[in-house]
Image (cartoon, grey):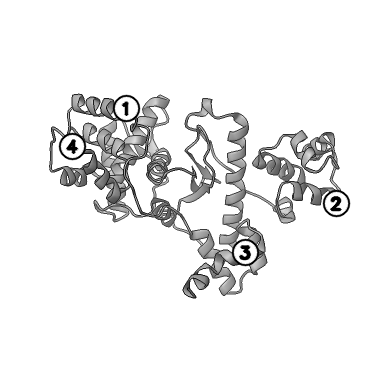
Amino acid sequence: MLDSRIKMARIMSGFSLQELANRTNNAISKQAIGKYEKGLMKPSFENLQAISKALNLKLDYFLRESKLELGEIKFRKQSRLPKKKQNEIIEKTRDFLERYLETESILSESHTLEIPKKKFKANNLEDVEKIAVEIRKLWDLGSNPIYNILETLEQKGIKIVFIDEEIKHFSGMSSWVNDKIPVIVISKMKKDRIRFTALHELGHLILSIEDLEDKVQERMCDRFSASMLLPENALIDELGGHRRNIHLRELSLIKSEYGISPQAILYRAKDLRLISESYFISQVKFLRMRGLWNKEIGIYHGEEKSNRLLQLLCRGISEEFITSTKAASLYNMKLSEFRREINKIDASSNN
C-alpha cells in the first residue's frame, strides 16, 4: 500500500524519480525511491517525512487506504497531451476524490445521482438535441440560462474536480468512480470554456456513442453541450427567428446571459438553420481576419465554482464530527490557510 502511495504522490507532483531525489537534496537516492515504489524496501519514518516534505503533502496521504477505482479515461486531444501529464492529472483526480469521498463517509452523506446510469442511445445530432431537452426537463431547468454549471452538476450527484492550472492541450475529461459515481475533471480556463467543456464531458457520461469514431463522438458532445447551454427555443427567442445578419454585439449580449461564446452561438444558429451555411462561413472568415475567432468575445459575469466539499467540511466542523486540522487535511490546505478560507465571510462582514 505504501509503495503505491509513494508512486502516486510522485506522479501527481509531476516528478521523475531523479527529480524527487533532488528535492530531498539527494538525502534519498533515486534508486532507493524506486525500490520504495516497487515494494522492495520500506522507507524509514525520517525518509517518509523527507518525501512528504519534498512533495508538499501531509504524512496522512501516504497512510490513507484507498478503495477508489477510476473507470476508463479518454483524454480529448490525447495524442497532444504528454503521457506524463495525463498520469499527473489522473493522480490529482484520484487524490481529490479520495478526500472528497472520505469527507462524505465521515458525515454519512449520501448524494442522489440524477443522471440515468443507463446511457441514452444517440444515432445522430437530432437524437442528441432531444436528449438535451430531456435532461433539462429531468432537472427542471426549462429553457432558462444555467447559473454555475459546476455547482449544478454537483447537485445532480456528479463529482467535479477542478485543477487550478491552465494545461496546454487539456480542457477536460470524465469517468466513473467505482463504476457508480460520475466524475468530471476541468482545468482552469475562461468561464465560457469551463461551462462548455463541463457539459461536453457530461455528454460523454450519458450518451451511448462509444461505437462511433472519435471525431463523431466529439461533435455529438459539442452539440449536446450547446443544446444544454442554449436551448433551441431560447435561441429562436433571442434572435427572433431566421436571420440574414447578426451583429457581433448582439452575440456578446446573449453570451452575457447564457454563458456561451459568440463563436459557439454562431455554430448553434447554423446547426438550427437560423442562419445559412454561407453566412456562417463569412462570419468565421470575418472574425479570423480581425484576429477574434480564437479570442474571448464579450463577458460572462456568472460564477463557475463548486463549493460542495468546503460546505461539507464546514458542516463537519460546526457539528464537531471533524476537527479543523482534519478538515484542512481533507481540503489539502495548511491549517492556517484553511482557517483563513473558512473565516472569509466573518472577515468581510467586519469591513
Which residue is found at the position 32% from the left and 54% from the top?
139
Vertical comparison of 125 with 154: above or below: above
Image location (x, y in percent) of residue 253: 25, 47
Q: Which residue is mark 3?
A: 327
Specify few, some or many for label 1: CA neighbours under 10 Å numbering under 14, 14-19, or 20 or more. few
Q: Determine the image quadrant of residue 280.
A: top left
**Which numbered marker is on residue 288?**
1
**What type is the residue that disc 4 sits on?**
Ile
Image location (x, y in percent) of residue 116: 39, 47
**Which numbered marker is on residue 46?**
2
Q: Is residue 276 left or right of residue 318?
A: left
Contact? badges 1 and 2 (CB < 8 Å): no
**Disc 4 to disc 1, C-alpha distance:** 16 Å
Q: Is residue 19 left or right of residue 338?
A: right
Q: Which residue is mark 4?
A: 246
**Disc 3 to disc 2, C-alpha distance:** 25 Å
Of 67 and 278, the residue lying toward us: 278
Which residue is found at the position 46% from the left and 55% from the top?
306
